[in-house]
């Protein structure tokens, strides 16, 4: 079996040695390559490859390089590292990477299967006891699918400390998912969306009053479930994140007047709107498991980067027919989104995109904006940035002992963007 | 009630309009029963439910989002008290009222439930 990927290597200087050893090891781990070879090839005439001492730079550069893999680890000497060597930077570089050999069987996608089953059971159990008036619409939304990324991150993070209790972890994970769904119900109401995941939204099916009440009910219920765990740090982490989400929602609606926005504004909004709950899921899980403080901090940063990557990848769904929500909805709703921001930066097509966005956006304008965004290459740029963030997120975990959870966290991290890219 | 004197001003960021629009009086009521942070949390919960679930028309989006922020901030204030009994009592009160608003079983008035939660012996 052979797998192939591209490795993004941004450089920041005219000449530069970029140590890519840990990233290559991440690729080997993520691919579950046990014994075989990693082949690397530069895709640029002025980017070389070198193997050598971490401190003494080699001058002998090659365009290709093959490394052996044994028992899932790169075969390297004690001080030996692999470098991408920039000769004409700074630039955005890419390396082609292929892995061949014997691979371990693939794990269940998006986290351990037993974790997912536990989360589903706990969600079903919690919904079962609720009054029909709130239960029925929420069950429709929950049963429509969803990737369960936040609860699975929480479940995995809860294994990072000595106090392992799968049932308490599942209670926390289900509560986090209910908070997420409560925000979706209110989001759909604010955006006047008719469908989500291919089904009618609560506002569209049960009416506006019901949508408001259902969101409030499940926010309160989730808060109670978390309080009942009796861990004040966990309670605070989640409460703090939910406040960040709410502030960001207000920001998001307010900023629609300054559409399409810029990168800094975009990051500020999505850090609150999306990444805050990813961060909290990881942090609260680790806190519940009584993980050491440095692990809690690392896994929180991992969640933050992953949440940002997820939102960037999610922005791309506006240009796809397979997401369950109407194509072009972000453009119609004037939601701050990264593909649009990048498209407006394009020298040739950007002015036309801005012109279209400045006026009323009916179906005709939405279609033209989408075509222009594709033509600028903005979608590829967003995709690359999202992948780079996932790699950076995984690097946050390099220095900590993950006690066997690393492969599942890596799988889950890659699944956040690979489902789209 | 003066928010600065009470030491709660920082918690009102983004909620100044609802504070001036009536939350101040609600806070004054609960302040007779509880410490500033708890009284403010109760006032925020009551204000949120007033904004979101009462009246003949559903709230417009800004009103809904301010209500959400009130609930979230109340939750954070209660988290800071590290008082699990209060956290659970307040959450249950909101659950009952929201469920009733969605067409579920009738609920006791919110204030009655919050006062009970504040006043329950530890």
Image (cartoon, helix red, strand yellow):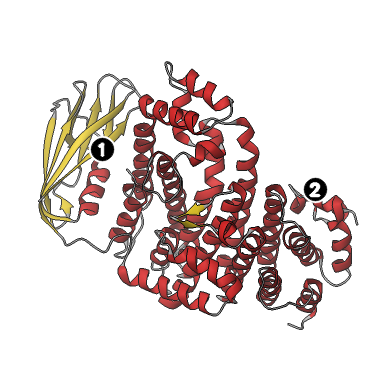
Q: Residue at x 24, y 53 (%)?
A: A30
Left or right of residue B8, residue A34 in this image: left
Left or right of residue A305, residue A136 in this image: right
- Residue A7 numbered mark, or none: 1
Marker count (numbered): 2
Q: Residue at x 38, y 25 (%)?
A: A376
Left or right of residue A301, residue B29 in this image: right
Residues indicated by labels 1 and 2 sit on the same polypeptide chain: no
Mark 1 touching mark 2, by CB under 8 A? no
> Closest to the observer: A313 or A80?
A313
Q: Position of residue A187 (x, y in %)?
A: 58, 52
Left or right of residue A214, residue A153 in this image: left
Residue at mark 1 to residue at mark 2: CA–CA distance: 49 Å
> Closest to the observer: A332 or A301?
A332
Q: Which residue is mark 2?
A: B16
Identify the subunit bearing mark 2. Answer: B
Q: Is residue A275 above or below residue A343?
A: below
Q: Residue at x 83, y 57 (%)?
A: B23
Q: Position of residue B119 (x, y in %)?
A: 80, 79
Q: Is residue B11 visible?
A: yes
- In the image, farthest residue toward the top: A348
SS for dot 2 = helix
Q: Is residue A92 above or below residue B114?
A: above
Q: Nearer the viewer, mark 1 or mark 2?
A: 2
> Closest to the observer: A366 or A386?
A366
SS for dot 1 = strand
Q: Position of residue A176 (x, y in %)?
A: 51, 64
Q: Is residue A29 above or below residue A235?
A: above
């Amino acid at each position: 079996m052979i797998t192939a990927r591209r490795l993004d290597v941004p450089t920041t200087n005219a000449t530069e040695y970029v140590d890519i050893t840990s990233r290559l090891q991440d690729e080997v781990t993520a691919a579950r390559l046990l014994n075989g070879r990693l082949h690397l090839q530069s895709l640029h005439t002025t980017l070389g490859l070198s193997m050598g001492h971490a401190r003494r730079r080699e001058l002998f550069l090659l365009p290709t390089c093959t490394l052996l893999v044994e028992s899932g680890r790169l075969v390297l000497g004690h001080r030996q590292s692999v470098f991408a060597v920039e000769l004409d930077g700074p630039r955005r570089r890419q390396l082609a990477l292929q892995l061949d050999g014997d691979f371990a069987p693939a794990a269940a996608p998006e986290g351990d299967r037993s974790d997912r089953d536990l989360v589903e059971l706990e969600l079903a159990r919690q919904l079962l006891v609720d009054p029909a008036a709130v239960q029925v619409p929420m069950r429709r939304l929950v049963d429509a699918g969803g990737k369960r990324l936040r609860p699975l991150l929480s479940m995995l993070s809860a294994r990072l400390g000595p106090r392992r209790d799968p049932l308490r972890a599942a209670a926390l994970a289900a509560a986090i998912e209910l908070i997420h769904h409560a925000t979706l119900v209110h989001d759909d109401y604010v955006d006047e969306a008719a469908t989500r995941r291919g089904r009618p939204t609560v506002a569209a099916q049960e009416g506006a009053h019901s949508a408001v009440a259902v969101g409030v009910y499940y926010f309160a219920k989730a808060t109670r479930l978390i309080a009942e765990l009796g861990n004040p740090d966990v309670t605070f982490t989640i409460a703090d994140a939910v406040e960040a989400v709410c502030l960001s929602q207000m920001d998001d609606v307010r900023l629609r007047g300054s559409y399409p926005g810029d990168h800094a504004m975009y990051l500020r909004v999505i850090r609150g709107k999306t990444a805050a709950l990813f961060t909290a899921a990881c942090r609260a899980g680790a806190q519940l498991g009584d993980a050491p403080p440095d692990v809690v901090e690392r896994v929180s940063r991992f969640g933050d980067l992953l949440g940002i990557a997820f939102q960037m990848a999610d922005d791309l769904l506006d240009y796809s027919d397979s997401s369950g929500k109407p194509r072009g909805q972000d453009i119609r709703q004037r939601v701050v989104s990264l593909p649009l921001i990048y498209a407006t930066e394009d020298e040739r097509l950007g002015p036309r995109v801005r012109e279209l966005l400045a006026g009323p956006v009916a179906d005709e304008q939405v279609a033209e904006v989408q075509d222009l965004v594709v033509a600028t290459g903005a979608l590829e740029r967003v995709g690359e940035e999202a992948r780079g963030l996932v790699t950076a997120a995984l690097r946050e975990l390099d220095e900590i002992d993950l006690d066997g959870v690393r492969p599942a966290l890596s799988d889950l991290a890659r699944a956040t963007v690979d489902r789209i890219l | 009630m003066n928010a600065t004197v009470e030491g709660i001003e920082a918690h009102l960021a983004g909620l100044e309009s609802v504070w001036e629009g009536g939350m101040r009086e609600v806070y004054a009521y609960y302040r007779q029963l509880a410490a500033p942070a708890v009284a403010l949390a109760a006032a925020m919960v009551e204000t949120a439910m007033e904004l979101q679930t009462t009246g003949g028309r559903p709230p417009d989006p800004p009103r809904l989002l301010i209500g959400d922020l009130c609930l979230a901030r109340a939750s954070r204030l209660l988290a800071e008290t590290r008082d699990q009994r209060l956290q659970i009592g307040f959450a249950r009160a909101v659950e009952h009222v929201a469920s009733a608003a969605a067409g579920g079983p009738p609920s006791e008035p919110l204030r009655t439930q919050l006062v009970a939660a504040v006043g329950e012996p530890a």
